[in-house]
Amino acid sequence: MKKLLTITLLCAAVAVTAAEYKFKQVRLDIRSIKDTTLSKPAALEGLSIAVKTPKDADEDLTAVLFYSDTLTAQWKKVSLEFVPEDDGWINLAIHTPGAAGQIDRISPVWVDNIQVTGGKLLNGDFETLKNGVPAHWRMTKDTKFIPGKGMNNSNCMQVFHGSGLLGQAIRVKADEKVTLSLYVRLAE
């Protein structure tokens, strides 16, 4: 009986650990570059907001971090909007949240159908390829191109924390509202 109780408690502990095992979110970092100042962004769908100022004294621009609600295996739309105060550029970086020492607790996320109004984003559906990967995107080593698994059997990208980052610079205009939307889900 004692052995059965020990096994039951061990299984329960594993079940609780598995339920809390992974971060199931996407993270969008928006950083103003080229002296562009941004208004405080508003989350429209499925996002929470954190504003962070860089520590580097040479960088007085604001990095704005957005985290989605918990994701599932179903595609979910997330979107936000903001207004640039100057003509210039913003840098969009898509990955997953987490911190050092938590890599084994973070779920990879698939991203598809990225759209921007009020700014110019290229190849948001990942269908235009160059050398076998989507053109116009910066990728780090663990970012993966996933052909045929997107929303409509299209292409999508898999992102991860830090080493699985997907990014693109977007040109914006002063006082023209920018709306960013994309679809995300947990990777298979």
Image (cartoon, rainbow, N blue to C red):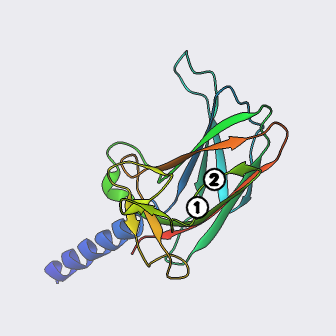
Q: Position of residue 109 (x, y in %)?
A: 45, 64
Q: Secondary structure at mark 1?
A: loop
Label 1: few (<14), some (14–19) or many (≥20) C-alpha neighbours in 10 Å: many
Report the amino acid beneath label 1.
Gly
**Marks 1 and 2, how far apart in space?**
7 Å
Above or below residue 2? Residue 124 is: above
Q: Quadrant of residue 41?
A: top right
Q: Residue at x 24, y 72 (%)?
A: 10
Vertical placement of residue 114 versus 167, above or below: below
* 41 shown above or below 57: below
Residue 119: x and y in percent read 72, 49
Q: Which residue, as the protein is rendered here, is positioned at the far left? A: 3
Q: Is residue 21 visible?
A: no
Residue lying farthest to the right in this orientation: 175
- For the C terminus, give its image quadrant: bottom left
Q: Is residue 142 left or right of residue 155?
A: left
Say which residue label 2 marks: 121
Instruction: In this rendered view, identify the residue nearer to me: 21 or 90.
Output: 90
Q: Closest to the observer: 65 or 59?
A: 59
* Residue extending farthest top: 57
Left or right of 174 on screen, residue 172: left
- Residue at (56%, 60%) from the top-left corner? 123
Amino acid at the residue labelled 2? Leu
Secondary element type, mark 2? loop
Residue under the point 48% across and 69% down = 156
Residue 128 at x, y percent in the picture? 50, 65
Count of marks, rendered view: 2
Label 1: which residue? 124
Residue at position x 17%, y 84% in the image: 1
Contact between marks 1 and 2 (CB within 8 A): the answer is yes
Characterize the local packing of mark 2: few (<14), some (14-19) or many (20 or more) Cα atoms within 10 angstroms.
Answer: some
User: Measured from the top left, where is residue 104 in percent x and y?
Assistant: 31, 56
